[in-house]
Image: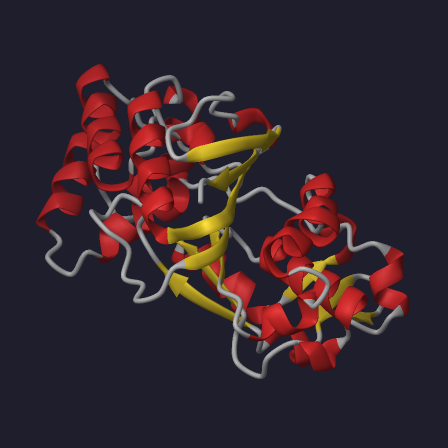
Amino acid sequence: MSDPIDLRDEEFRQIVDLVYARYGINLTNKRTLVHGRLNGTVRKLGHASYREYVDHVYSDQTGRELQRLVDRLSTNHTYFFREADHFDFLIHEGFPSMWGCDVAHGLKDARIWCAGCATGEEPYSLTMLFAREYGLEALPAHPVILATDISVDALTIAKSATYVRSKARVPDEYIRLGLVDVVDGETVTVRSELTRRVLFKRLNLMRDSFPFSNPCDVVFCRNVMIYFDVETRQRLVRKFLALLQPGGYLFLGHSESMGRHVPGFDYVRPGVYRRKS
């Protein structure tokens, strides 16, 4: 095996600045990650240095090399029903606070956004939960969840709806309910009755505004902002505030709490905020 190509300080800074400017991801303290994940790509493309590689990314007018770069640097670790207390809160407290006792009716026109959905386990967890709690017949025929990410590779896996069972950690309850198919005991595939309720799209959270014509009831953006600096987090939360309808909920990861005093939001519990009416 060939020795790895050296990543010089100036080259590392170029990559850090590029990724931050385009995607808001702060890689300042991730030199080992950048070197490890990009070295094979640099070699495969035949470049003698990271400087040549960065020049190649900048000169590619199609944008494909930039997309490949962010795909390589994105961390898409997740699993079904991660931080499950948020899902429990949404079902038992969040939805009833928005729609009263007729949650099934409220779901018919609900708009739920999973921002930074990675490989899709989060939105599929929500559809499984809705099917268990309210029945498939309560879900609209059209997608009730918009799921977005910047990584094309992650979205490809999400759209396939097929996962390695040991890594996906699908609770047995949902297998017994027939909401996923198990193949050879090794892979699980989410049933089509659920996948058609999710619409996957590529979206960069750093764009100036989001291309939505209607407000959202619920926004999940969990374990995404850990890669952003404070200023970027605050700017993104302001955009979520503008998008959410009064009384709507914003869910962040447990390690991403913005504190108890976020302008425009009431703090509910760790990682859960409600837009002020």
Relative to 41, say whether 127 is above or below.
below
The residue lying toward the viewer, choosing from 162 and 100, is: 100
Residue 91 lies in quadrant: bottom right
Instruction: Let me know if residue 32 appears in the view.
Output: yes
| Number of residue marks | 0
* Residue drawn at point x = 15 percent, y = 61 percent: 62
The percent coordinates of residue 246 (x first, y second) are 44, 50
Name the colouring of the figure.
secondary structure
Above or below: residue 131 compared with residue 37: below
The reply, left or right, for residue 28 in relation to residue 140 is: left
- Work out whether residue 150 can be spotted: no
Q: Residue 16 vs residue 120: left or right?
A: left
Q: At 44% across and 45% down in the image, what residue appears?
A: 277
Return the residue nearer the eye: 215 or 234: 215
* Position of 260 relative to 219 (above/below): above
Q: Quadrant of residue 26?
A: top left
Front residue (pair 188, 120): 120
In terms of image quadrants, where is residue 131? Answer: bottom right
State the image coordinates of residue 118 (x, y, percent, origin top left). 51, 51
Image point (68%, 58%), residue name:
125
Name the residue: 65% across, 76% down. Answer: 139
Q: Position of residue 113 (x, y in %)?
A: 48, 57
- Residue 61 placement, left or right of 2: left
